[in-house]
Amino acid sequence: MYFRDNPVLQRELIVNLRMTRGFLLLFAYIALMGILVYAAWPANQTLDLVQPEEARKLVNLFFFGQYLLVALMTPSFAAGAITGERERESYEMLLASPLRPGSIVLGKFAASLTPLLELMICSLPIVMLCLPLGGVSPYEVLAAYLGMMFSIALFGMISLWCSSYFTRTTASVIASYILILPLAMACVLIWRAMEQLGPQRLFIVLTVVPIACGSIGALIWVDVCRRLLHPPDLGSGGKQVIDLETEAKEAVGLYIDREQFPDRLFSPPKRTTFLADDANPIYDKEMRSEIFSQGTLMLRLVIQISMGLALPVMAVCLFMKRELAPWYIAYVLLFNLLVGPVFSADSLTSERERSTLDLLLTTLITPWQMLWGKLFSGLRVSSVLTSFLMWPVFLACLMPVGYWPNLLTMGGYFLIVALTAVTTAMTALFCSTIFRKSSTSLMSSYLILAAIFLVPVAARVFTQTFAPSSSAQQAVEFFEAFSPFSAAFNLPLSLDDNYTNVARIDLRIFFGFIGFTIVYNTTLLLLMMQLFKVRWRVSE
């Protein structure tokens, strides 16, 4: 019952393959890859065996872009495999079936990776079109795809492991992203570092990568099966009841104590008095119970992993090589991009899923109270988490390490991070307003924010590499003002060792980002206010 007669695998494949979004995703993915290859194709030649450097750049761009896209899509398919059963209240029925835990895990794992495998296989003919340009052998392409498939399989197993530990899909997705993204970036850097090894790189990819991914995946497999065989929340309808005091005593390492500082920054202590007459009940409910109703495991994981990764990045970028300070800000922005939507994307969809939204809209609470209560509760947690990573920047400004002449630039970094935190929370709340499911709202938030923040940066790198003198350069420079990453890299930085980047910056991008952010967030706020005023969900 593992493959041929696995009912979990059959059910998941039938449901997934019959959905329209699967075909739309495949079409959009292949179209995007085809457009990239077409845009980067050499304009003056179709065959070059003497100088094949352009072909190698084209294949690397295609492979790295595809690898990062598939890696980022993996949690969206696998991180909700088991938490979805809990949310549909079918978790206990699945465990009570005659299926073995290994069959359940295999069915979920294979069904989650099937759409991703389709994307990778369907894109293979496009990269084969680049082979006549020379510079890349078919063996390198096949080895790259083999290594990509094994690493994506490992990422899928990591997402499934997160899905077995958390009770909400949103928490599982963000934990998966935090674990997978550093691994994906490390794999890209290792592949680039081994570029000069030639046949040795192929040998490593064909031997070491499968063994490493298979071994780690097998260990994770055993742990997931163990949790299904002895579930800690059986008998509660798949919904584990969390006692924060017991969790704090039994937690290994970091734990959240809301009675102490700085843990009180996340949420105020438990209420022991009546709610004041002028208080916002929505904000009070969200901060004191809703966010922490499922425990603090996800929050503790985010803090520990993010700070662990930030320590080497901080040491190198802020103190050892100070000219790389914008790269640390980019790390903080990427962290907020991943974490910010999590605490706001289910603000209203969770009300719909609990069938309490219509009751909420018929209360005497004003639309403005509902909006700012939901917005500030999620923004408070995400901004506190992000501020932990900005403390090293503040300390660097106080220490005599060369940042004192750049206080305006450092203030600009803080402003960029603050505006980005507001934008991520506002976008996630807007998606939670217009969508029905929390998982759909979260993934839509990620797509919108990635299109606004990351696509202009990718377009800038693409045009500089393949079309440095084209007319598209001006359009790309205009859209760069939408990205906080571009704004951070376009602030002047002058250090004591005669280093300055003034010749390479454009302050118009920084001020354009501020203006765009204000207009964008104001527009979303007005749209949500209008939706609340007309009671847009009552009629459904």
Image: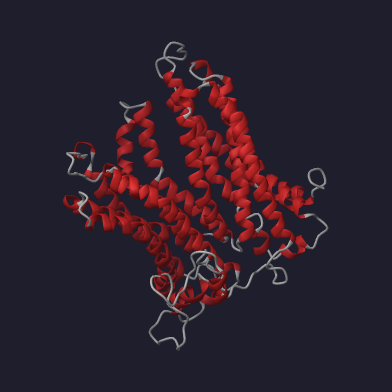
**Is residue 388 in view from this perspective?**
yes
In the displayed structure, 478 sits above or below 94; it is above
On screen, residue 139 above or below 478: above
Residue 21 in sight here? no
Taking the image as shown, residue 424 lies to the left or right of residue 321, namely right
Q: Is residue 235 above or below residue 382?
A: below
Q: Is residue 305 above or below residue 133?
A: below
Q: Is residue 75 left or right of residue 302?
A: right
Give the tally of numbered discs.
0
* 243 vs 12, nearest the viewer: 243
Residue 229 lies left or right of residue 284; in this view the side is: right
Instruction: From the top left corner, tell me how far across and down residue 497 is, in percent.
Output: 18, 40
For the C terminus, which image quadrant?
Answer: bottom right
Residue 164 location (% of width, % of height): 64, 58
Residue occupying image coordinates x 52% and y 56%? 442
Residue 83 drawn at (x, y percent)? 64, 60
Residue drawn where x is 54% and y is 68% of the image: 537
Residue displayed at 68% across by 67% down = 232
